[in-house]
Image (cartoon, grey):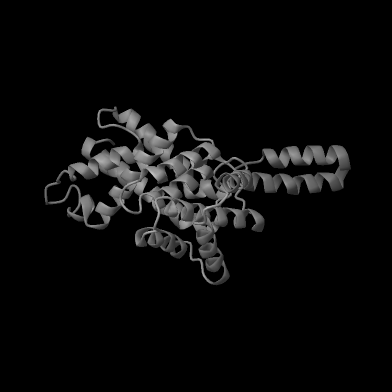
Amino acid sequence: MRIWGKLLGAFFGFLFGHIPGLLIGLWIGHRFDTGMGLQGGFRRRPSDAQQAIFFHATFSVMGHIAKASGQVTESEILVATNLMDRMNLTGELRNRAQASFREGKSADFPLRQTLSQFREACMGQRDILRFFLEVQLQAAFADGHVPPEERRILETIAEELGFSRFELERILTMAEAQMNFYRTGQGGGYRGQQQGWGGQQASREPPRDRLKDAYQLLGVAESDSDQDVKKAYRKEMAKHHPDKLAAKGLPPEMMEMAKQKAQEIQSAWEMIREVRGIR
């Protein structure tokens, strides 16, 4: 139970306003304690202006990436459409998202200015910026690979958001592994081939490629120690936990994507843990 906010609020409230100040300070302190109980920080909903900037940047930059190599492919349009579906965007919001995607395809699209406004709206929250970058990678990988033209745009995005080239390459590797891990899982995958660990049917090793993707999704190598793998899993979960991202201002409409990402990190960890026998 958190009480420091109440104690400090009551103390300073009484100091400046006696009994009425004490009561007001106690109430403010209670709100502070409640907010800090939500994953270590306040859960805040972005303002309408911030949310508008977030949505516009998300879909306009996605459209810019899609247009980078010339003709926008059906796969790239499908990625944007699926994102709108997962965000449950309908009516005017969906129209705005589609208009932003079209705007991003224009030759004079102000990429750096758009990213600068987005970064300012996010108040530099690094986990939110990384989440945004990971969303853009879905458009880049829409056709199964990242052409040089799209890679150059990704480098500009990373630079504007404050990520180094090394960090971008690492995020690219992890994002590609995540997509492969998700696709093979959808098609049956490791869990789909087993009747349950520890049951009558003998456990089988997961497909080699899927296990490799699981390691890369966590940003570790098969040669790393159990302790390092566990540490990497906890670090990735801390970055992508939906409640933590919500507390930092992730729009509610983006929460479904955050939940899926966290589930895939959890699935990768569980696969590695079973193979290694980590308890």
Left/right of residue 141 with respect to residue 246 in the rendered view: left
**Quarter of the rendering occupied by the N terminus:** top right
Q: In which quarter of the image is residue 231?
A: top left
Q: Which residue lies furthest to the right in this view?
A: 17
Q: Can the viewer see residue 47?
A: no
Q: Which of the pair 242/71 is nearer the observer?
A: 71
Residue at (44% x, 65% y) in the render? 85
Q: Which of the pair 173/181 is nearer the observer?
A: 173
Q: Where is residue 276 in the image (x, y as percent from the top left)?
A: 23, 35
Quick check: 45 above or below 91? Answer: above
Q: Position of residue 20 (x, y in %)?
A: 86, 48
Q: Where is residue 29 in the image (x, y as percent from the top left)?
A: 72, 44
Q: Position of residue 31 (x, y in %)?
A: 68, 48
Q: Which of the pair 62/271 is nearer the observer?
A: 62
Residue at (54% x, 64% y) in the render? 99
**Quarter of the rendering occupied by the C terminus:** top left
Left/right of residue 61 with respect to residue 179 in the rendered view: right
Left/right of residue 213 with respect to residue 154 in the rendered view: left
Quick check: 166 above or below 77? Answer: above
Q: Quadrant of residue 220?
A: top left
Residue at (78% x, 44% y) in the render? 25
Q: Can the viewer see residue 176?
A: yes
Residue at (29% x, 38% y) in the render? 215
Q: Which residue lies furthest to the bottom in this view?
A: 91
The count of marks equals: 0
